[in-house]
């Protein structure tokens, strides 16, 4: 976290021990208790940067992510329209589901379900009222932007002369497959989807040149599991709304509210809590040892000064 970020807008500066000490988060593995601790601190550092970003920049990045997520419906729908029915067709068409995630994550656009882990770790490190408020600010702006982007791209897919009737029918069929789930299933599926996306975020710092492969594998699992994701699912459900297949209020419930709650529970209250818990004691022990060493050095310096002042040296 740079000094420029800290002071440009103090109202959104994250409260942390490093901020109080005017230092940076330590991310070097050799200086931390474990590899897991290093990954945790890398993600926490990234989370602080996201929490402190300008609201307008966050919004436009989130809108871009919503638009990009339309690629998942487009690719999956085109494959669905041209592949034969059956297990092989199902497995192949869900490769298209991964495309939107690849675009969003590799382009560093703001995706809500990524933020259920990344932006939450700084708050778990120091859960003050101020930090919780700026987390809610981030979540609100990103979710609003994501949904706006998905609505625009769904409207464009329906009304622009881009796709043939067979592909449009595939869009409807894929989207209707979501809405057959009752609210309880939306919520439960959303938990697993949130957990998988959070797992993917946790893996990314170690992925190196295999980042795209990690994205494909993890999001493909969401696709073939028919799990509910608030952003990708919004493209599909908005398509049904604009096509007149379902009323507007069905977007809110049974889809959006249960899915959103499930994604948050899976990404935050399960994965992020467990990820933080596994390294909390190690980091706490390390900080205590560092404080003891600092106190010992301060004591030694004071003793030397006292000896000099009294003429003992």
Image (cartoon, helix red, strand yellow):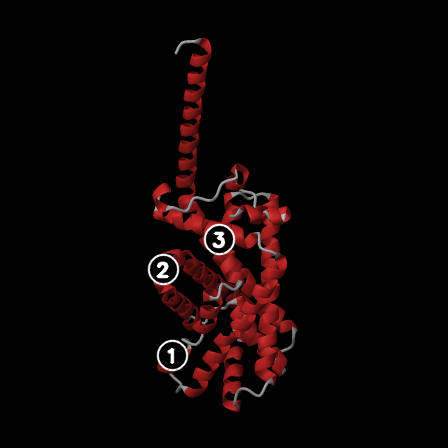
Residue 181 can be seen in this image = no
* Residue furthest out toward the bottom: 165
Instruction: Compare marks 2 and 3 and give the one earlier in the sequence.
Output: 3
**At which x and y percent is residue 240?**
59, 79
Cα distance in 3D space between marks 1 and 3: 34 Å
Q: Nearer the viewer, residue 202 or 13?
A: 13
Helix or strand or loop: what does disc 3 sit on? helix
Q: Residue at x 52, y 48 (%)?
A: 2
In the picture of the structure, the residue carrying the numbered disc 1 is: 92
Is 87 displayed left or right of 128 in the figure?
Answer: left
Cα distance in 3D space between marks 2 and 3: 16 Å
Q: Are marks 1 and 2 in contact (CB under 8 Å)?
A: no
Q: Nearer the viewer, residue 217 or 20?
A: 20
Q: Residue at x 61, y 44 (%)?
A: 129
Residue 40 can be seen in this image = yes
Q: Are marks 1 and 3 in contact (CB under 8 Å)?
A: no
Helix or strand or loop: what does disc 1 sit on? helix
* Residue furthest out toward the top: 311
Q: Is residue 290 above or below residue 150?
A: above
In the picture of the structure, the residue carrying the numbered disc 3 is: 46
Instruction: Compare marks 1 and 3 and give the one earlier in the sequence.
Output: 3
In the picture of the structure, the residue carrying the numbered disc 2 is: 207
**At which x and y percent is residue 175?**
53, 78
Q: Is residue 274 above or below residue 210?
A: above
Q: Residue at x 54, y 65 (%)?
A: 259
**At which x and y percent is residue 112?**
54, 62
């Amino acid at each position: 976290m740079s000094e420029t970020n800290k002071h440009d807008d103090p109202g959104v500066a994250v409260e942390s021990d490093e901020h109080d000490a005017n230092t940076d988060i330590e991310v070097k593995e050799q200086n931390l208790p474990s590899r897991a601790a290093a990954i945790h601190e890398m993600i926490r550092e990234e989370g602080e940067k996201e929490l402190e970003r300008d609201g307008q920049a966050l919004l436009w990045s989130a809108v871009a992510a919503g638009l990009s997520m339309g690629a998942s419906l487009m690719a999956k729908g085109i494959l669905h329209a041209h592949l034969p029915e059956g297990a092989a067709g199902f497995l192949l068409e869900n490769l298209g589901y991964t495309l939107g995630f690849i675009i969003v994550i590799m382009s560093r656009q703001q995706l809500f379900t990524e933020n259920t882990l990344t932006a939450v770790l700084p708050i778990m490190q120091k859960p003050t009222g101020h930090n919780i408020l700026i987390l809610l600010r981030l979540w609100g702006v990103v979710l609003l932007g994501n949904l706006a982007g998905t609505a625009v791209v769904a409207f464009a897919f329906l009304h622009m002369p881009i796709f043939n009737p067979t592909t449009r029918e595939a869009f409807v069929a894929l989207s209707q497959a979501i809405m057959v789930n009752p609210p309880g299933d939306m919520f439960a599926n959303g938990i697993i989807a949130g957990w998988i996306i959070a797992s993917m975020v946790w893996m990314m710092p170690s992925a190196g040149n295999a980042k795209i492969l990690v994205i494909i594998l993890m999001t493909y699992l969401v696709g073939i599991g028919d799990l509910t994701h608030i952003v990708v699912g919004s493209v599909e459900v908005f398509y049904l709304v604009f096509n007149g297949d379902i009323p507007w209020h069905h977007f809110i419930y049974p889809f959006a509210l249960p899915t959103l709650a499930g994604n948050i529970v899976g990404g935050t209250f399960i994965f992020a809590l467990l990820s933080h818990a596994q390294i909390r004691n190690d980091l706490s022990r390390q900080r205590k040892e560092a404080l003891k060493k600092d106190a010992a050095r301060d004591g030694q310096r004071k003793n030397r000064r006292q000896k000099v002042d009294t003429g003992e040296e």
